[in-house]
Structure formats: structure tokens, C-alpha cells
Amino acid sequence: MRDILIPGDMVASEPLRMENTYVENGKTFAKVLGMYEREKKTLVPLEGVWIPKIGDIVVGIITGTKNTVYEVDLNFFGRSILIGSKYERQSYKNGDVVEAIVKDVEDRKTVILSGPKILYGGTVLNIKPIKVPRVIGKNNTMIGQIADLTGCNMIVGKNGTVWLKGEGVGVATEAIRQIEAEAHISGLTERIKRMLEEKCGPRRPRTQETEGAEEKFE
Amino acid sequence: MGAMDLVKNHYIKEILARGVREDGRGMFDFRNMKIVPGVIDHAEGSAQVDLGNTRVLAGVKMQVDEPMPDTPNQGNQIMSAELLPLAHAEYETGPPSPEAIELARVVDRGIRAANCIDLEGLFLEEGKVWSVFADIYVLNYDGNLFDASTLAVMAALMNARVPDYKDGKADYTNKATPLKINSVVASTTFCKLDRSLLLDPDMHEEGAADCRITITTDGEGVRAMQKGMSGSLSTSEIEKLVDLSFDKYREVKKKLEESSRRRD
Amino acid sequence: MANKANKPQLLVNGKRLDGRAFNELRPLKIEAAVLKNADGSAYLEWGNNKILAAVYGPIEAMPKHVADPAKAIIKCRYSMAPFSSVGEHSRSGPNRRAIEISKVTKEAFENVVMLNDFPGSEIDIFIEVLQSDGGTRAAGITAAAVALANAGIHMKDLIYAVSAGKIDGNIVLDFNMIEDNYSDSDMPMAISPRNNDVLLLQMDGHFTREELKKAMGMVIEAGKTITKLQKDALNEVYKKAEVKYEEGA
């Protein structure tokens, strides 16, 4: 059973420890608009911002540089910084798109990044961070099929920023927007596949443009 | 400028060099245009216009006023625009920005120059005339507010009904007479990016542009123009764009007439 | 409550001018997720009110000195369009009345938004009255609550607001414009329906203790209908895609 819950809806008449809920007077209430799965006892948000966690792979844009400390825009309410190594020769400039890992989160709002990789060329797209797992799909199935059928190279950050490059950016963007709108409806993978095949024909070889991406820091 | 623009500016130019726009449109295509007149009953006239994801609501109010000293026998036309903070994350609350003032003035000039509103017909009696207030309310911003706003104000004027005039006052409970419209104008806004010229720029194209030009025509002649941003245009480019704006005028006018017919 | 001298008869044979019973709401229609750029939005028609509410955030609090490192701050702007009323054109931008409404609205939402979940951020609530017909502050709050939920903001509850007041000694719910102008007392309230706590309360005119109790009871009773319509509007957004799939398959 799946139900859409709205903030203030009672989840249980007993106190439960469940993400996206709160307990008041011994009862558990939803605190976010979400899909409640009775069996799994989970409330999955349908909307909302990215809450950074250590280990998240993100895509960001360099927006400020000071010596070897870089400000990175991750399209969320906190700050995000990347600290370059002393031995690093290549630096970043404003507007560079990077893929990186969240190494630490301070006070729930300052994100420290590591392991950056510049993503050369292409464009970026912001989607609802809540929808990222569906855009990637189980074992990368969704993102894999978009890449295969459009020939577009893509990296999807947990923060909702997607980097795209190649001929098929337009169709890939359309596919991602559709996933975002229909993420909670079953049969999504098939539906997206049909849409892509209609637009691009059967699978075509992927261009190897990501080869340009370089490992930066350790 | 947001972080996104840092990436988009470069990307948009890169694909334009190959003759491609981000949404796949031709260089001189408008985005999808939707006109809904009569959305605010309390206003004398109103219309909501969608141009792609740009959404503008125009409301027309009329009230009994004194004439301007230099035009004692004419009604007044007063235009204003608000870039509402709900329309875009970077729009802020506060007094009208220079962008909002420019927008209102450019739309006002086109409509005034073509005598769209029959201002002489708005004379009531010695010292009393109608003022026509047209307010542009930007609800969602995705580029090209000029064309969307001219269209919305035009549609709202075509939809407007004049209140009855009784004992020196407006009777807002009786609004039977349509506001007289002398002519219809449409504006076309182009951007120049590197060497490419394109119609109806979206938000990111506007952000990447070197130069912008708005040409307002009434089908017969050019009625108003406004060049914006620091880039430049050659005289031959301007001539080309004026020709295009005449072509586009017919397209826009047809849309306007269709939407006002649907209403009646 | 001006012009008491030419007060029209607001109640005829126990009915109101628009035919409603004393405890009857005007027709209310809510739609969620109506604007592309906003993180959450709602459009509401309540009687002849037409209201657009939008939420941006949580985003980084600006300017930096207003940020609270421990929690989110809420900013709220209520404003009326210059073409929103039946009479003359009004000046655009918030006036003193609008600034007060913005403040009490913000304070109502501060009670339910889980500010500690978004430290250092700001949440912006914009309420634009496109057409006004009495009770716009209540309508604005009801719309903004839907917009906040639609933005995925963590909240304890989905709040609503409505007003009750007095006409010729009778307690009456949800004034329209003319009732608003000539009533004996008016009391807009915002309520958190999970416990019926009062989050906004303004009142002027005259109530006896008994009348006040009755008016509050009427507001809470009406809340059941309003809350249901708010929830339906949110459910509709996620059902919409379902229909599209069935049709498009």
C-alpha cells in the first residue's frame, strides 16, 4: 500500500523512529509531503531540497576562488567548498563544472568536497534532488538507457545538478524532465525507453567525450 | 548572474555556432504562445499570456481623472510593470528596478505611438477624462518579457470594457462599452549572440546575449524600437530584423484576434 | 468597517446576500504546482478572490547578516495587484496594511515550519492577490500552506485560515467584500488542524464572550472542508501524471 501523506498527517498512534516524521504527544506525524509505504514503514519525500550526506557524489559549478580554496555551487541552501592540495598545479576557474564527493558536512550546512574531476564542455541542468535515484535507476539502468539511446554523456549529482554533453542533450533533457514529473509512477523505465526510441531510433554508439575528464586531487 | 549562467553562456554559444538552439527552435521562431483574456473580472480588461515558460498577467483599470495639462482633450495612458519576486529566484522585493521601468516604458511607447488606445475618445467633460492604467504583472520569468508584455497589454486592452460615467463618477457596476482600439501592435525581440541573431530569447539566451533589440510594429510601420545591452548591431542587421518583425506581426496579430474571438 | 451610515441590509430572511447560510463557506478551488520557477506554488479562487502563492527555498539566506546559523528564517510578502479591486486603480507594491499582513502571516508559518532542519537558510513566501473580494489574508495563508507543502518544506502541519464575524448580532463565517466592509466585527484566524491551535488571530469590532466562542467554533468546523480541499489539491498534482500515463500509453 502506498499513500501520499501531507505534513501533519498521522503516520502512527505510537511514537516511531522514522525519517521525515516527527513525534508529538506520543504520536507520529508526517513532516513532509511524501509517499508512505506501509510495509516498509518508510516515508519518501515527493519534494524538497538536498540534505547533504558524507559520501554523496555531487555535480557543482565553481563560483569563487581564493588561493586554493574554491566555492562550489551545489544548488542548495548551504555553502560548499573544495580545498585544493598544495601540490596541485592546475587550478579551477569560475564556471568550471566539477564532479566531487562529499567528504564532510559541518553544522548540516557547510559541505567539504574532495576527489574533484573537471567535466569539460557540455551543459548543466538542475532537477529536483528527490528524483535523483529515479533518474539514475536501479544499478544505473535508467541513466544507462538514456545514454545508450541518445548518445549523450551524463553525470547525475546527488544534489540534483546533472551534467550533459554530446549530440543528444536535447532528448536526454526531455527524458530527465519526464522522469522528474512521473517518478512515482510504476513502469517508468519502459515508458522512457519507448519515448527515447521514438525520438532517437534504436540504440546508437555513445560518443567518447568523457575521456577528456581528468582526475584532479587525490 | 547565477552559477548556472556561468556554464550556460558558454554552452549556448557553442551550439549556436552549429546553428542549434537549446530547445530545438529555429532562429526566428517564437515559443509556444497562449493568450487567455478576461482572467480578472474586477479589472476593466485583463489577459494572461504564456510565451514558453514566461508568464505575464496584464490588468487594465480605468478611472476618472484630470487630463494632463498639455493634452486637455485626451484621456491618459499610464503603464507600469512589476517583476514580482514570485516570478524568479533573483527578483527581489522593493521599488521597481530599472529593468521593470524600462519594460513598462517600452511597452507604453509602442502602444502610444500607434494610437492603439483612442485617447481622444476618452474625454468626458471639461477637466475630466478617463485614465487607462495598464499594469504588467510578471508571474514567471523565462526571458523576453517585452514581447510577452506587449501581447498581454494588447490583449487586455482588446478585452477591456469602459465603466459607465454618471454624475462625474465612474460606475464600476456597469461596464458595457468596449474600449475603442484604433490599431493593434506587436513587438518582436531579438538577441544577438556572437554572430547569431535570434527571435524570442529565453532566459539563458538573454543571459548569454551581447545585444537585444525590440521592434514594435502596427503592420504598416515601425512604431517603437529599443536596443538594449552593451553589444552592437549593424544598420543592415537592423533592416533585416525590421523585415522579420513585419512577418511576425501577422502571426502575432492572428493569435490575438483568435483569442479575443474565443472570448466573445 | 467604514461608511456605517449607508450600510446595506446584509441579511434577508436569515440568509446572506449571496444566499449562503451563516456557517457556509464561499466556493473554494485550490490548484497546486502552478508556477514553473518557484519551488512550490498554489493558485486559489475563494469566492471572487484570486490568489497566487509561491515559495522559494530553502535557499541561502541573504543578506548574510540576517542568516541564523542554527535555523531557517522565513520572509513573507503579501501584496495586492493594482487591478485587483472593483473600484479605482490602486498603487502597486505593499502598503502599511500589506506589511502588517505579511508580518502576522510569517509568524503563523514560523510555528509549523521546522526551521531547525534548514540552518542558515531562508524560505520565501510570496502571496499575490490578483483579485480581491474580502478575506484575502485568510485565502493567502491557505494558499501559501499548499505552496509550502508543494515545495517539500518540513512542517508540523498544513495550516489553513478563514474569518468569522458578526452581522446584526449573528455569527457569520467567511465574509465576502461587502460583508467585510459593513460587518460589526471581523476575526480572521489561522489554525493548525492537528490540534486546532490558533496561529493567527486578529479581531476588531465587538464580541461577547459567548459570541467569540461560537465564532471560533465555526472557524474550526469550516477547517475540515478547507483542509480537505488543500490536501486534494496536493494529491491531484501526483495523480495528474498517473492519468497522463494511462492516456499516453
Image (cartoon, rainbow, N blue to C red):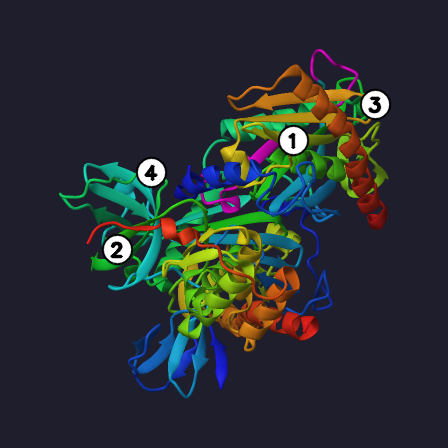
Distance of label 3 from label 4 (alpha carbons): 48 Å
10 Å crowding of disc 4: few (<14), some (14-19), many (20+): some
Q: Which residue is mark 1?
A: B189
Label 3 marks which chain's residue? B
Label 4 marks which chain's residue? A
Q: Amino acid at mark 1?
A: Thr
Q: Which residue is mark 2?
A: A109
Q: Are marks 2 and 3 in contact (CB under 8 Å)?
A: no
Q: Amino acid at mark 4?
A: Asn
Mark linked to residue A94: 4
Q: Secondary structure at mark 4?
A: loop
Closer to the chain start, of discs 3 and 1, is 1
Q: Amino acid at mark 2?
A: Lys
Q: Secondary structure at mark 3?
A: loop
Q: Which residues are magenta?
A: B68-92
Which residue sits at x=78%, y=22%? Answer: B114
Q: Are marks 3 and 4 in contact (CB under 8 Å)?
A: no
Instruction: Choose between C142 and B93: the one closer to the eye.
Output: B93
